[in-house]
Image (cartoon, rainbow, N blue to C red):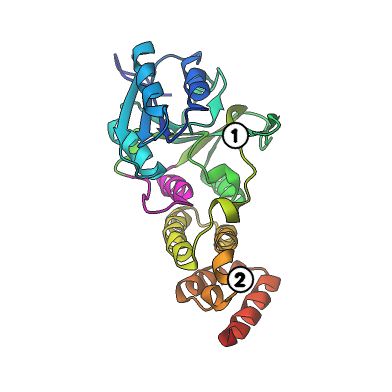
Amino acid sequence: MEHLLDNEMMYSVIVPVYNAERTINQCVDSLLAQNYKNFEIILVDDGSSDSSPFICDEYTNIDKRIRVVHQKNSGVSAARNAGLNIAKGKWIAFVDSDDYVEQDYLIQIECENADFILCCFKDCYQLTNRKIVPHIYSRKVTLEEEELHCFLKKNISTVLFRPPWAKFYKRELIGMQQFTDDMKVGEDACFVMNYLSKIDKMALIPNGAYVYMIDNTPQNIKYGMSVSYAAQSLGYLCQAYKTVNKKFHFGTHGFISYLSSFKDMSRDDWKQKPSRWYRNDTVHSFYSYVWKDLPLKQKLKYRFIRFLSIFR
């Protein structure tokens, strides 16, 4: 990484906190245990109703690198934006309050020269505490130009690029970019894709030092929504996808998985009346966008049910 000026902060780690009294200690303690020391932790309490605000404030007495922001409940995107607004580090990282990191999380990327750093991570199932490392790459590597294009084309729609955590962003490249605060699903991927449209070089870090806690709740239950809300969220995602696709030209196939996910999450709203999904003009515009890359079986199914739904 580039040389730091005197007293310049390397990392700002932003942690949105909402009713996290059971997990926040493990999260913050894991950050304080880092081998690397030149960073700040910004805890953003998003109007918690449990003891989280008190716990956050107590940490400011333990370590001067910790800052706390209290705000009325406005959602995780607004909390992350509040952290971005006051961050001082050259690099920005996000950690969710129910996740934690291992000791070398920050130091492992200290010498990487890139615009964006993508880290491998561990999935940890809360009920069993069983960890699985997705081994997507076996060594540190820096990608640019054609290699970067190929990697994004293959992985843009995967879990690698959906959450904002297990990644490092240059604050100067983030600029005025913010999370979309009227989305409750997909806002993370929007932020990541909008940032990707600004980069020329990406570093991949194989060590799974970020531990993501999974609760196994099906997404249609955890993120249930109406078709109209799904269409609005897909609109934001499609705009972000088009922005990064304009730079890297990897086609529309990567957007198909988002379309399928939001269809599933809004299923309870349209399953008794399929026309709510299949005759929705906004949703139809997304199918039109991906049509040339949509598998034939999905094309036939969509056209058939769209026709039948005229009568339901």
Q: Residue type at mark 1: give it.
A: Met
Which of the numbered marks, if any, corresponds to residue 213? 1
The question of residue 189 being in magenta is answered with yes
Q: Tell me if residue 308 comes above or below residue 218 in the rendering.
A: below
Front tag of 1 and 2: 2
Q: Tell me if residue 279 comes above or below residue 1 in the rendering.
A: below
Which residue is painted at 44% across and 59% down in the image? 233
- Residue range (magenta): 177-199
The residue carrying mark 2 is 271
- Residue sticking out furthest to the front: 50
Which residue is painted at 43% across and 24% down in the image? 1
The question of residue 261 being in magenta is answered with no
Secondary structure beneath disc 2? loop
Q: Residue type at mark 2: give it.
A: Lys
Secondary structure beneath disc 1? strand
Q: Position of residue 265 (x, y in %)?
A: 56, 59
Give the mark nearer the N terminus: 1 vs 2: 1
Task: State which quarter of the image contains the C terminus.
Answer: bottom right
Q: How many marks?
A: 2
- Asked whether, in this view, residue 173 is left or right of residue 126, the answer is left
Query: How many neighbours does mark 1 have within 10 angstroms: few (below 14), some (14-19), or many (20 or more)?
Result: many
Task: Tell me if I can see residue 111 in this picture.
Answer: no
Task: Tell me if I can see residue 118 in this picture.
Answer: yes
Q: Position of residue 77 (x, y in %)?
A: 39, 44
Give the camera-side residue of 293 and 286. Answer: 286
